[in-house]
Image: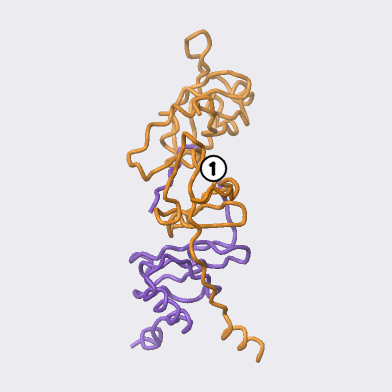
Chain colours: A purple, B orange
Amino acid sequence: MTRSTWKGPFVDGYLLNKADASRASGRSEVIKIWSRRSTILPQFVGLTFGVYNGHKFLPVQVTENMVGHKFGEFSPTRTFTGHASDKKAKRG
Amino acid sequence: MAEQRILMGVIGRPHGVRGLVHVHSYTADPADLPEYGPFRDDRGRTFTLAWASEGVARVMEIVDGREVKLTDRNAAHALVNVRLYVDRDRLPPTEDEDEFYLTDLIGLRAVTPEGRDLGKIDMVHDYGAGTSLEIGRLILPFTRACVPVVDLAGGTVTVVPPVEIEVPDDGARDEEAAE
């Protein structure tokens, strides 16, 4: 068994508590976090986190496909906005 | 809205000696750019283009209703940095009522259900974790819960700011301070 397998995914513990509390409340809320290093776990699916990028908290709506990635991957610290042209946004 | 121009691309440096140019496409799929033609530039000239290879196109100027091809490198060089625009009404209607063009969303006024003005939409973010709207210092997810009404004709979106919970990174900072 490799070291990374037996150690398991890293996640800051307080995120788990806060995610449980948020899920229990049933409200639509954004959990503001600084922990970009934490792995996205299956119990976070359906929640919305505001992940700090050093400047602002970007909303991250967690879906199944994001499990196993880190929060920081979805909140870039350097942003290139580009041009709108024919690009579309879908309301979730 | 019909008179609104949208920047779709920019003509870049010449390619070879036969009038081909590099074209920087800003469309979602760069290959789709020629389908939006004909394009207008800042001086009112009209162009069409056809891809010759990846990122390289043959540009034709429309003069008196007929297409005039660029035949040499000098003619191509004269078009460097020409911006290619189309009118907003050239974009096809969206397939879904929950789908919007970024160009339509940016600039809309955001108001609360009580009618309080929050400012206008400055940017639309999408980094793979859902779309979000930046309204002044407020950034909120583009969901039906947070943005229940999008009134493009009226130029407003109704915004319900979500409840925000802060989770301070206390543990990590204490560890770093101890080191």
Number of numbered labels in the structure image: 1
Residue A51 position (above or below residue B148): below
Query: Residue at point 52% right, 8% down?
Result: B64
Q: Measured from the top left, where is residue B59 in percent x and y?
A: 51, 24
Residue B143 falls in which quadrant of the image?
A: bottom left
Q: Amino acid at mark 1?
A: Ile
B78 and B89: which is toward the camera: B89
- A31 horizontally vs A1: left or right: right
As drawn, which residue projects farthest toward the bottom?
Answer: B178
Q: Secondary structure at mark 1?
A: loop
As drawn, which residue projects farthest toward the top?
Answer: B64
Q: Measured from the top left, where is residue B170 in percent x and y?
A: 58, 83
Which residue was labeled with disc 1?
Answer: B106
B69 and B88: which is toward the camera: B88
Q: Quadrant of the C terminus of chain B?
A: bottom right
Q: Measured from the top left, where is residue A66 in percent x and y?
A: 38, 66
Query: On what subunit does the disc labeled 1 rest?
Result: B
